[in-house]
Image (tube, helix red, strand yellow):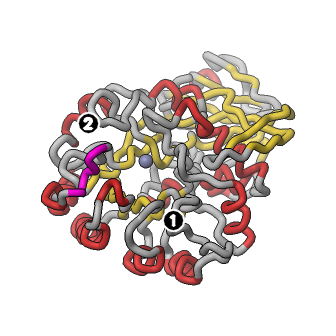
């Protein structure tokens, strides 16, 4: 059997949260797919054997919030190289394309990237903008077009994106959120809702969101945050979690506060999805990359299995793609990450200038996309 393997990962610990506890298994790959997961697979004849001792073999990581429409959108950059270097085999672009310029996203980003680049399509015709904001003039909204784009591009377009930041929507927050939810209903897909510096209350936002919709930047310190000024988690936020609203980190340069994350997690609001929000202005700062963002949660007390679930199967589930992504299984496309937790003093920074030092760091050793290293 082994002579059929193009690539064989040996001596690693398989950390595949959807399948239960960690296991010591070899993983055989052929023709771009996983063809065997078993202890002690024979090495003779495998075209390439990779010894991944002391490493974790996980599903390829999913960065659920990036801006990858470089050269077109003001927040966009070529996210493919950093994904390929950090275990990320799938990334979801958060609204860089709207219904007008989505065809270009397919041609310039999806078709040219090694990483599987998915898209949350903006309600705003041309995607998210900088100054002026994309929906300061609500006439630029096209919820029907956004919904149609998602329906017609089921291989890439996975949901609707709306930003409620006052510089994005001016006074139109309520109307814009309503349009986004209507678009989500019309294409039967989740809406990713940007919170942080919104003109409408957190209560109104979460009460408008449907089960399965995604709050992105969930730990933003910008007001109104999920905790009130006294540090108490807002009851409406917990109720939303119980109804099935999904909470996504989307760190970026402005949306991560160590104290706020700890306070919220202590009160029951752990993240469902851990993502970076890497964009043209955030990469060089304190976000760095997905493994660095994951390391922050290791430092804040989540265990590695939960962390990996949050950027694999949980992220896949949020877009209804758990049959294709986020799980290691014989027969599936071989999107695989090889991660290690190394003992190394590391200083981490949040978005409000706090620095903390920790003794461990999550690093990506290999990124395997469709069977290729
Ligand atoms: Zn973003």
Spot occupied by residue 225 in the image (x, y as percentages of width and height): 55, 67
Q: Residue at x 46, y 47 (%)?
A: 65
In the image, is the residue at mark 2 within 8 Å of ligand 1 by its beta carbon? Answer: no
Q: Looking at the rendering, in which quadrant would you find the N terminus?
A: top right
Q: Which residue is mark 2?
A: 106
Spot occupied by residue 18 in the image (x, y as percentages of width and height): 62, 57
Q: Residue furthest left?
A: 139
| Label drawn at residue 341 | none
> Is residue 215 a member of the stretch shown in magenta?
no
**Residue 144 vs residue 272: left or right?**
left
Residue 62 seen anywhere in this rendered image of the structure:
no
Q: Residue at x 75, y 35 (%)?
A: 340
> Is residue 134 a member of the stretch shown in magenta?
yes
Q: Residue at x 50, y 69 (%)?
A: 224
Q: What element does badge 1 sit on?
A: loop
Task: Choose the circle earlier in sequence order: 2 or 1.
Answer: 2
Spot occupied by residue 16 in the image (x, y as percentages of width and height): 66, 49
Depth check: give the residue in front, 50 or 349.
349
Instruction: Tell which tag, 2 or 1, sits nearer the viewer.
Output: 1
The magenta-colored residue range is 131-136
Q: Residue at x 70, y 57 (%)?
A: 306
Marks 2 and 1, how far apart at CA: 35 Å
Depth check: give the residue in front, 135 or 215.
135
Spot occupied by residue 332 in the image (x, y as percentages of width and height): 50, 43
Q: Which residue is mark 1?
A: 223
Residue 149 seen anywhere in this rendered image of the structure:
yes
Q: Looking at the rendering, in which quadrant would you find the C terminus?
A: top right
Q: What element does badge 2 sit on?
A: helix
On screen, 103 above or below 99? above
């Amino acid at each position: 059997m082994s002579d059929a393997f193009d690539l064989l990962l040996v001596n690693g610990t398989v950390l595949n949260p959807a399948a239960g506890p960690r296991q010591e298994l070899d993983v055989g790959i052929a023709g771009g797919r996983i063809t065997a997961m078993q202890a002690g697979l024979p090495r003779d004849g495998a075209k390439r054997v990779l010894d991944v001792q002391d490493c974790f073999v996980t599903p390829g990581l999913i960065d659920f919030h990036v801006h990858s429409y470089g050269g077109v959108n003001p927040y966009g950059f070529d996210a493919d190289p950093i994904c390929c270097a950090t275990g990320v085999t799938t990334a979801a672009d958060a609204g860089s394309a709207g219904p007008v310029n989505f065809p270009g996203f397919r041609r310039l980003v999806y078709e040219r990237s090694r990483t599987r680049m998915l898209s949350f399509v903006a309600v705003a015709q041309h995607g998210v903008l900088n100054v002026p904001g994309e929906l300061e003039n609500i006439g630029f909204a096209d919820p029907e077009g956004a919904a149609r784009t998602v329906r017609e591009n089921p291989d890439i377009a996975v949901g609707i994106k709306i930003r409620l930041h006052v510089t994005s929507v001016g006074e139109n927050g309520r109307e814009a959120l309503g349009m986004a939810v209507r678009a989500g209903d019309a294409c039967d897909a989740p809406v990713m809702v940007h919170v942080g510096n919104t003109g409408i209350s957190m209560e109104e936002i979460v009460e408008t969101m449907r089960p399965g919709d995604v709050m992105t930047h969930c730990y933003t310190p910008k007001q109104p945050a999920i905790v009130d000024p006294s540090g108490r988690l807002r009851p409406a936020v917990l109720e939303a979690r119980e109804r099935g609203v999904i909470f996504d980190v989307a760190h970026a340069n402005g949306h991560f506060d160590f104290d706020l994350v700890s306070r919220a997690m202590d009160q029951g609001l752990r993240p469902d999805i851990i993502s970076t929000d890497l964009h043209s202005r955030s990469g060089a700062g304190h976000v760095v990359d997905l493994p660095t963002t994951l390391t922050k949660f290791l430092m804040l007390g989540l265990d590695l299995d939960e962390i990996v679930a949050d950027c694999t199967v949980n992220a896949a589930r949020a877009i209804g793609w758990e049959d294709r992504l986020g799980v290691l299984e014989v027969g599936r496309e071989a999107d695989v990450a090889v991660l290690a937790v190394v003992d190394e003093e590391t200083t981490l920074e949040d978005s409000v200038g706090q620095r903390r030092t920790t003794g461990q760091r999550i690093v990506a050793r290999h990124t395997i996309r469709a069977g290729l290293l």
